[in-house]
Image (tube, grey):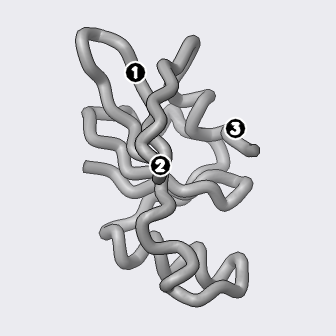
Amino acid sequence: MHFITNKHNHFFIVKAQLNLGLLNDCVVHESLSDMYLYVCEQETLDIEQVEGLEYAITMKNGLWASVDDRGFVEVINGCVYDYISDFEL
């Protein structure tokens, strides 16, 4: 499992194997709590404001998908590394 924050301070749990060297402008964290603390510091937020709001990136049947905090699933079209690195709302 990987814990990743991108350049826009969006944060992800990746539940599949990744080559972390292919990410651009991302921070890889040792743990979920480290990732939460990093986002809190970057965005001046309390831990309660970020817990559980990460995107989960998974692979099923050969397709990458992103699941948001509400459970909505989006199939990732294209490169998963670009998706994680460049994702913003």
Are the residues flagged by discs 3 and 1 in contact, CB closer than 8 Å?
Answer: no
Residue appearing at x 47%, y 36% in the figure:
72
Kind of element beneath mark 2: loop
Q: Position of residue 10 (x, y in %)?
A: 62, 55
Residue appearing at x 62%, y 40% in the figure:
85
Return the disc, 2 or 1, that comes first in the chain's sequence.
1
* Residue depth check, mark 3 versus mark 1: number of the one nearer the observer: 1
Front residue (pair 25, 40): 40
* Residue depth check, mark 3 versus mark 2: number of the one nearer the observer: 2
The three-letter amino acid code for the residue at tag 3 is: Asp
Dot 2: within a 10 Å radius of its alpha carbon, few (fewer than 14), some, or many (20 or more) residues? few
Residue appearing at x 40%, y 37% in the figure:
57
Return the disc, 3 or 2, that comes first in the chain's sequence.
2
Q: Which residue is mark 1?
A: 64
Kind of element beneath mark 1: strand
* Residue depth check, mark 2 versus mark 1: number of the one nearer the observer: 2
Q: Is residue 56 above or below residue 47?
A: above
Kind of element beneath mark 3: helix
The three-letter amino acid code for the residue at tag 1 is: Trp
* Image mark count: 3
Dot 1: within a 10 Å radius of its alpha carbon, few (fewer than 14), some, or many (20 or more) residues? some
Real-space Cα separation, disc 3 to disc 1, in angstroms: 16 Å
Give the image quarter of residue 20: top left
Task: Residue 70: give its label.
Answer: 2
Q: Which residue is mark 3?
A: 86
